[in-house]
Amino acid sequence: MLKFDEQKQIDSVNGALALRPEIEKVVDEIQNRGFDAIFFIGIGGTWASSMQVEVYMRGRSSIPVYVENAAEFLTTGNKRFTKDSIVIFSSVTGSTSEMVKAVDKAHEIGAKVFGFIDKPEAPMVKQCDWCISYPMNEQLKFYMVANRLMYNNGEFPEYDKYNAEMEAHLAQALVDVEKEADEWAADFAKKKYEYFRANPDMPHYFVGSGNQWGATYSYAMCYWEEQMWIRTKSITCPEFFHGMLEIVEAETPVTLFIGEDEQRPLAERVKNFLPRICKNYTIIDTKDYELKGISEEFRGSISHLVMHAVNNRVDAHMEAELCHPLEIRRYYRQLDY
Amino acid sequence: MLKFDEQKQIDSVNGALALRPEIEKVVDEIQNRGFDAIFFIGIGGTWASSMQVEVYMRGRSSIPVYVENAAEFLTTGNKRFTKDSIVIFSSVTGSTSEMVKAVDKAHEIGAKVFGFIDKPEAPMVKQCDWCISYPMNEQLKFYMVANRLMYNNGEFPEYDKYNAEMEAHLAQALVDVEKEADEWAADFAKKKYEYFRANPDMPHYFVGSGNQWGATYSYAMCYWEEQMWIRTKSITCPEFFHGMLEIVEAETPVTLFIGEDEQRPLAERVKNFLPRICKNYTIIDTKDYELKGISEEFRGSISHLVMHAVNNRVDAHMEAELCHPLEIRRYYRQLDY
C-alpha cells in the first residue's frame, strides 16, 4: 500500500491515547478551579476540529463550550469571554500568527489557556498555562478532553468502558479501515483524476454534517484545495437543501460523507435525494467499516476518525494520480500577506 | 432602472423601522421575564441572517446570544437550551418544515418563541408566543431586536440617536446606494455573464467577513446558486488564507465584500493580497457609498444592508443577461425530499 506504515500509525494513535493521564490532570484542574465557559479557538483546519468537538458536546453536555475563529476573536472579540474563561487550542507548528495573537489576547483578558502543540520546542509552548506536545491526532486529543469534561460533569458514565475499548481497539480498527478502503480509494482517485483532467474548472462537492462537517470542510479545503489545487465546495447536509441543490445536475461530482452520530438522518436525506438528480455521486459511509472491538453505541463518536482514515487512502492515490507532491504550496507561507 | 420602484422600497424599509414600538414591547417583555439564553434559529437564508445578528452582538453584548441551524437543533439538539431559553426566528412563508418542527421542539422543552413571519395568515403565526408579520427586511428586524436587547442591557447608550438617524435617513440612503450602483452593476453583470458563458463550470468565489459573512454566504448560495444556477463558493476572509487561496490563479473570478464593521481589517488583508495572484477580482466596498445622514460610527451596523442594496442591482442585471427569471426553481419545493 502507498504511503502506509501500519505499525507507525498504530503507535501514533496509541501514543495519543496514552496521553490520557496527562489530559485528565489538566482537565480536572480546570474543572476544580472553575470557569464560566470553554472556548475552542482555531483557524483553518484547527477551527474545523474545534467545530467537531463542539458539536460532539452540544447535544450531550450542559458545559458551556463554544468555538471561536481566531481571526474573528482578534477583531470582533467576544463579550462573553472573561477572565474566568478557558481557551483550548491545537497547533502543529505553534507559529500560526492568528493563534499566537489570540492566546495573547486571552491572557490580557485574564483567561487561562490549554494548548496542544505538536512541536515541544515551539516558543508558543511557553505561552500556554498548560501544554501537551505530541504529534498529530488533533481530533482525538480534543475528544479526549471533551470526554473527561463530560465525565467529571456526570454526563459520561460509560467513560471507563469507552476508554478501555478505545485503548484496546481504536488504533487497529483505524488501520483496518485504511486497508479495507485502499482498493476502493485507488479506483475512486483514478475516476476523480480523470474527471478533473476533463473538467479542470468544475468544483468537486463535498457534503457532510455533525462531526462529519469539520471533516467535510477541512477535507475539501485543506486537502483538495490547499494540497491538490482542485476546486471544491463543501456544504452541510441541511444547507444542501437550501440553495446548493439547484446547481447539481446529472454529471456534477458530489461526494457525501455519512457518519454515525445523531446527524446521520440529515446525511441520509441527501443520500436518498441525490440519485434522483445526479449520477456522478459517491457515498462514503462509516457504517460500511467493521471497527472490530468498538461497541455500536460508541461508533458515532469516532466517525470523523474513520472518515479521515478512508480519506488518507484517497489522498495517497490522488497524489500518485496527480503527480503532485501534497506538501507543495503555491502561496501559503511562501509569501508575506 | 430595471425592477426598481424607489417609493415602494422606501416604504418597505420605513414600514419595517415603524415596527419599533411593537418590537420593543416584545423585547422588553422578554427581558423583564428573564431568560438564560437567546437562540436565533434558522436554515438557509434565515440561518445566514441569524449569523449576522449574532456577530453584531458578539463583540458588543454580554447577553448570551447563539445561532442554531434548525436541522441541527432537531437532531443534535443543544443541552444548554432550556425552558428558560428564547427562540427568535424569521420566515417568509411560515412553512419551512425544519422551522415548524424546531419551534415545536422549543415549546416541548418549555422555551418561548418570538417569530417574524412575513405572511400573517401562515399557521405558524399561531405557533409563536410573540409574532410580528411584516414583509421582507429580515436583517433589519433582527438588528432592531438586537439594538433593543443591548439598550435594555445598558450596552447601547446611543440608541435614541441611532434610531432617529435610521428612521430619518436609512430608507433613502439605501435607494441612493441602488441608484449609485446601478451603472456599475450593469457592467459587472455583463462581464460576469460573459465569463459564465465562456466558463460555465467555474465557480464564482465570494469572500466576506463580519456582518458581510451572512451576506456572502447567502448571496452566493440563495441568489447565484439557487436562483441563477451559477456555481459559487463562499468563504470568510480569514479562512481564505487557510486553504482556498491555493486555487486562486490569474483568471479565477473572485468577488470580495468589504463592510465597515470591526472585521473590516480581515477583508482589507484579502484586498491587499488578491492583486498579487489574481487579475479577475472585484471589490465591493460599502465605504464607497455616501449613506447621507448616517453617522460614521453607525455605518458598520448597516454594511450588510448596503451590500444587499448593491447586490439587488447586480441581480436585476444578471436576470436580464441570463434571460432566466429568478423565481424559477429546478428542485426546491418542486419535488418531495
Image (spheres, coloured by chain):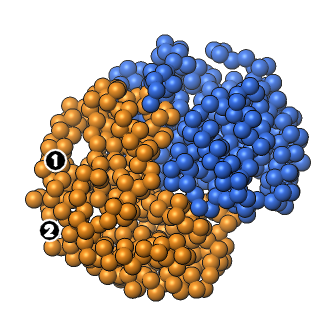
Chain colours: A orange, B blue
Q: Nearer the viewer, residue A117 or A35?
A: A35
- Residue A224, given in percent of the width and then of the height, sits at 30, 48
Label 2 sits on what residue type?
Asp
The residue that mark 2 highlights is: A5
Residue visible at 39% across and 86% down?
Answer: A21
* B88 to the left or right of A158: right
- Residue A208, given in percent of the width and then of the height, sits at 39, 47
Check residue B129 in the rendering and tell me which mark sits there, or answer none.
Answer: none
Rendered position, A145 above or below B135:
below
Residue B259, visible in the rendered structure:
no
Q: Nearer the viewer, residue A2 or A34?
A: A34
Rendered position, A49 above or below B4:
below
Rendered position, A126 above or below B1:
below
SS label for mark 1: helix
Residue visible at 51% across and 84% down?
Answer: A28
What chain does badge 1 belong to?
A
Q: Nearer the viewer, mark 2 or mark 1?
A: 1
- Residue positioned most to the top: B323
Q: Are marks 2 and 1 on the same chain?
A: yes
Label 1: few (<14), some (14–19) or many (≥20) C-alpha neighbours in 10 Å: some
Label 1 sits on what residue type?
Trp
Check residue A184 in the rendering and tell me which mark sits there, or answer none.
Answer: 1
Residue visible at 68% across and 48% down?
Answer: B107
Residue B109, visible in the rendered structure:
yes
Q: Quadrant of the N terminus of chain A?
A: bottom left
* B276 to the left or right of B264: left
Label 2: few (<14), some (14–19) or many (≥20) C-alpha neighbours in 10 Å: few
Residue visible at 18% across and 53% down?
Answer: A181
Tell me the CA gap for discs 2 and 1. Answer: 19 Å
